[in-house]
Image (cartoon, grey):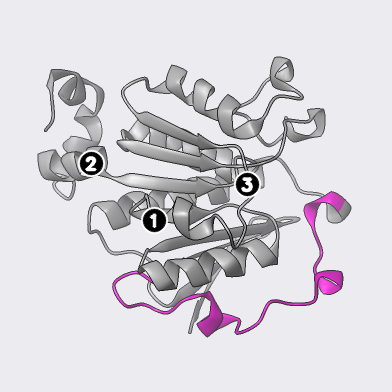
Amino acid sequence: MLNIQDYLRYSKPMLLPEIGNEGQEKIKNAKVLVIGAGGLGCPTLQYLATSGVGTIGVVDFDYVELSNLHRQVLYTEKDVKSPKATTSSELLKKLNPHVGYIPFQEKITSVNCERILSQFDIIVDGCDNFATRYLVNDTCVKLDKPLIYGSILKFEGQVAVFNNKGSKNLRDLFPEPPNPKDVPNCSLNGVLGTLPGIIGTMMAHETLKIITNLPCLTNELLIFNTLEWNFIKLKF
């Protein structure tokens, strides 16, 4: 139930007829898990927290590095060498102390994946490897959890929503993961710091739309070229 603090804090989104009191209450009651507190995870977490998502889980086994700071703007230099899951949770509390944060300072594996994901309503995948992506996707299908997918490379980003209200999943788009040797990554190819901010914010936006039952990407892969500002929607 919304309180006075909620009405004061979230007055602007509640002015939207599509959100209102009912939508904000859904946001407050939602439980969202973000996998990866890095380039995509940081902006996603920040906007989910400031939007008032009631419970936010953060999974990450990594530690903050100096080279992260140009794009993972939740952290500062004093956070270097700190564990991302617990550090991000503490920093998010400063943004919005009225949200519950559950850090998981561990790597998602076949052993713990179902246990962790089962605690949440919606899963957001901000990881950086295909093995984890497919494990998370398959677990979401098994548990019937909506999955928000995002990826970035150089100047291009992708966003999709999988397994939401009977929609298709990652394997319907890409049946098998590619050979890791054939997959380029940001470590070798680079990325402009603003790109994960753009794509991560879009992932948070889709998450909030799912929570509030607004139209979201359905059996569509959105490809966004930020160098030329081109959008492509691929239906699958």
Q: What residue span does the magenta drawing correspond to?
A: 162-187
Q: Which badge, 2 or 3, comes first in the chain's sequence?
A: 2
Q: Position of residue 48 (x, y in %)?
A: 40, 39
Q: Is residue 112 magenta?
A: no
Q: Position of residue 9 (x, y in %)?
A: 25, 23
| Left or right side of 149 for 183 | right
Determine the CA span between mark 3 and mark 1.
Answer: 27 Å
Determine whether the residue tagged by mark 1 lies in a helix, strand or loop: loop
| Mark number, residue 98 | none
Identify the residue position indicated by label 1 in the image: 118
**Front position in the image: 178 or 205:** 178
Q: Residues within 10 Å of mark 3 (few under 14, many from 20)?
A: many
Q: Which badge, 2 or 1, comes first in the chain's sequence?
A: 2
Q: Position of residue 41 (x, y in %)?
A: 56, 43
Q: Position of residue 217 (x, y in %)?
A: 39, 68
Camera-near label (2 vs 1) is 1
Q: Residue at x 13, y 47 (%)?
A: 17
Identify the residue position indicated by label 3 in the image: 196
Q: Amino acid at mark 2?
A: Asn
Determine the CA span between mark 2 and mark 3.
Answer: 27 Å
Camera-near label (2 vs 3) is 2
**Front position in the image: 78 or 81:** 81
Q: Is residue 2 above or below residue 93?
A: below
| Left or right side of 33 for 54 | left
Q: Amino acid at mark 3?
A: Pro
Q: Which badge, 3 or 1, comes first in the chain's sequence?
A: 1
| Left or right side of 221 for 64 | right
| Mark number, residue 29 | 2
